[in-house]
Amino acid sequence: MRCHRNCLVNLDKLKSIDFQERILFLGEEGQYAVKYARRRYREIRQKWLKEGE
């Protein structure tokens, strides 16, 4: 999934999201932090919540 103009993220590797700071945490223990665009907020949130079901 595209989270920013210059970045693609594999949602299978997504560990957590900081919605206030707009940061995605990736990797085994969330060691990689990637910012996401404001306009991608809804799409990322919907996919993240759907994956948790």
Image (cartoon, grey):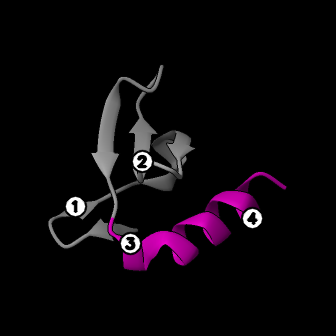
Closer to the observer: label 3 or label 4?
3
What secondary structure predominates along the stretch shown in magenta?
A: helix
Residue 43 covered by magenta stretch: yes
Q: Amino acid at mark 4?
A: Lys
Look at the image and tell me in which quarter the N terminus lies: bottom left
* CB atoms of marks 3 and 2 within 8 Å: no
Left or right, 14 with reference to 1: right
**SS for tag 2?**
loop
Could you give the CA–CA distance between mark 3 and mark 2, rounded to whole angstroms?
Answer: 10 Å
Q: Amino acid at mark 3?
A: Arg
Per the rendering, the mark at residue 21 is 2
Q: Vertical placement of 9 versus 17: above or below?
A: below
Residue 6 place in picture, x, y as percent = 14, 66
Left or right, 6 with reference to 24: left
Left or right, 12 with reference to 46: left
Which is nearer the N-term, disc 3 or disc 2? 2
Q: Residue at x 31, y 31 (%)?
A: 32
* CB atoms of marks 3 and 1 within 8 Å: no
Per the rendering, the mark at residue 50 is 4
Q: Residue at x 51, y 44 (%)?
A: 18
Residue carrying label 1: 7
Which is nearer the N-term, disc 2 or disc 1? 1
Which is nearer the N-term, disc 4 or disc 2? 2
Q: Amino acid at mark 2?
A: Glu
Residue 27 covered by magenta stretch: no
Instruction: Please provide the residue range marked out in magenta.
Output: 37-53
**SS for tag 3?**
helix
Residue carrying label 3: 38
Q: Residues within 10 Å of mark 4 (few under 14, many from 20)?
A: few
Q: Vertical placement of 10 versus 27: above or below?
A: below
